[in-house]
């Protein structure tokens, strides 16, 4: 199944979108995220930051943020099920001249179990990723008004 990718132009500035991508805000737009550990730094994104996250299905994992370029790009990786599964998520923000932002969202489950889950649950995973992307866009555009 590979990487799920969505791109859209958001009627919002990169700073507005970036604020919503902070780990502490994920429960607002990610339909699978139940909670994010409260800890210093969770209100922003920084290279090397790690935070615990729990999904609605009970899976808990440590999210590791890397390649952080403020208001432009970040990568989040995680491992769960004893390292047999993990995920890779990226958001890329490209500012446009009209105050809008082109946003690209990439997501994939990896590892032996993760790849199998993504293949077996393709429809549900794809639907959840798209829903999260659409909710992020809606929140960003509402915040921009």
Image (spheres, rainbow, N blue to C red):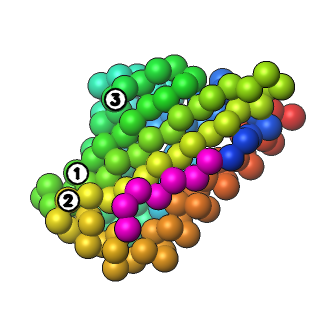
Q: Which mark is residue 66?
A: 3
Q: Magenta segment, which residues?
A: 1-7
Task: Report the Cα–Cα distance between label 2 and label 1.
Answer: 9 Å
Cβ–Cβ under 8 Å for marks 2 and 1: yes
> Is residue 84 highlighted in magenta?
no
> Is residue 4 highlighted in magenta?
yes
x then y, percent, for residue 25: 55, 41
x then y, percent, for residue 7: 62, 48
Q: How dense is the environment of label 2, judged by Cα within 10 Å: few (below 14), some, or many (20 and up)?
A: some
Q: Which residue is mark 1?
A: 79
Q: What residue is drawn where x is 34% and y is 74%?
A: 119
Which of the two labelled residues, at mark 2 and mark 3, occupies the earlier sequence position? 3
Q: Which mark is residue 111?
A: 2
Q: How dense is the environment of label 1, judged by Cα within 10 Å: few (below 14), some, or many (20 and up)?
A: many
Task: Report the Cα–Cα distance between label 3 and label 1.
Answer: 14 Å
- Nearer the observer: mark 2 or 1; the answer is 2
> Depth check: 111 or 80 in front?
111
| Above or below for 4 versus 69 | below
Q: What residue is drawn where x is 28% and y is 47%?
A: 78
């Amino acid at each position: 199944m590979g990487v799920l990718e969505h791109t859209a132009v958001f009627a919002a500035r990169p700073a507005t979108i970036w604020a919503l991508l902070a780990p502490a805000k994920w429960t607002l737009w990610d339909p699978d995220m139940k909670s994010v550990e409260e800890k210093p730094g969770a209100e922003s994104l920084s290279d090397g930051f790690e935070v615990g996250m729990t999904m609605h299905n009970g899976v808990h994992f440590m999210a590791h943020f890397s390649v952080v370029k403020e208001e432009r790009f970040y990568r989040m990786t995680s491992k769960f099920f004893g390292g047999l599964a993990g995920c890779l998520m990226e958001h890329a923000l490209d500012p446009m001249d009209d105050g809008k932002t082109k946003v690209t969202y990439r997501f994939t489950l990896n590892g032996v179990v993760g790849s199998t889950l993504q293949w077996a649950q393709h429809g549900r995973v794809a639907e959840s990723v798209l829903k999260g992307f659409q909710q992020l866009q809606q929140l960003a555009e509402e915040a921009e008004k």
